[in-house]
């Protein structure tokens, strides 16, 4: 089972690296999490990415994204950065364990 999780994690890391070639390096990766997501899975992702993982309070990232875009469209906020800063909060932050980082 660990191999499956690692395979998914490395596939997601490849996507992250492609995004970073377009927008530049990210110091942290923001993710949503459900109650059933294991601490090992989240920590494993931080280790594989070699980056801090910021876990949002939201368990519904699609709805949160729609709300963010709607708030901008309605003129509630001036820009995306301001909107995200105001509406997104984090329940915890995981640091990569460098001895296990990939």
Image (cartoon, helix red, strand yellow):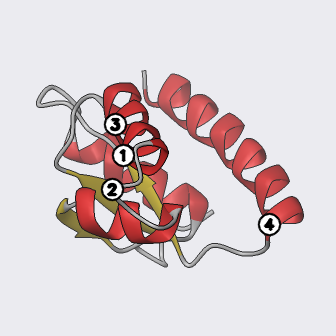
Judged by depth in the image, the label closer to the viewer, 2 or 4, is 2
**Picture quarter with the N terminus:** top left
In the displayed structure, 3 sits above or below 27; it is above
Question: Mark 4 and mark 1 in contact (Cβ < 8 Å)?
Answer: no
Badge 1 marks a residue whose secondary structure is: helix
Q: Which residue is mark 1?
A: 71
N-terminal label among 1 and 4? 4
Q: Which residue is mark 2?
A: 76
Q: Residue furthest front?
A: 75
Question: Mark 1 and mark 2 in contact (Cβ < 8 Å)?
Answer: yes
In the displayed structure, 80 sits above or below 41; it is below
Q: CA distance from mark 1 to mark 3?
A: 6 Å
The residue that appears at 38% across and 61% down in the rendered structure is 84
Q: Which residue is mark 3?
A: 67
Question: Mark 3 and mark 1 in contact (Cβ < 8 Å)?
Answer: yes
N-terminal label among 2 and 4? 4
N-terminal label among 2 and 3? 3
Question: Mark 4 and mark 2 in contact (Cβ < 8 Å)?
Answer: no
Q: CA distance from mark 3 to mark 4?
A: 23 Å
Q: Position of residue 40 (x, y in %)?
A: 28, 45
Q: Nearer the viewer, residue 73 or 83?
A: 73
Q: Residues within 10 Å of mark 1 (few under 14, many from 20)?
A: some
Q: CA distance from mark 2 to mark 1?
A: 5 Å
The residue that appears at 40% across and 44% down in the rendered structure is 74
Q: Position of residue 42 (x, y in %)?
A: 33, 48
Q: Residue furthest right?
A: 21
Q: CA distance from mark 2 to mark 3?
A: 11 Å
Q: Position of residue 60 (x, y in %)?
A: 27, 28
Q: Which residue is mark 4?
A: 23
In the displayed structure, 98 sits above or below 17; it is below
Q: Is residue 28 left or right of residue 86?
A: right
Badge 3 marks a residue whose secondary structure is: helix
């Amino acid at each position: 089972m660990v191999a499956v999780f690692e395979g998914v994690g490395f596939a997601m890391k490849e996507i992250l690296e492609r995004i970073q070639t377009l927008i530049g390096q990210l110091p942290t990766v923001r993710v949503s999490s459900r109650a059933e997501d294991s601490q090992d899975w989240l920590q494993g992702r931080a280790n594989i990415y070699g980056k801090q993982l910021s876990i949002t309070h939201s368990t519904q990232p699609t709805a949160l994204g729609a709300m963010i875009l709607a708030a901008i469209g309605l003129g509630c906020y001036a820009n995306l950065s301001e909107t995200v800063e105001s509406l997104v909060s984090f329940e915890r932050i995981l640091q990569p364990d460098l001895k296990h980082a990939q």
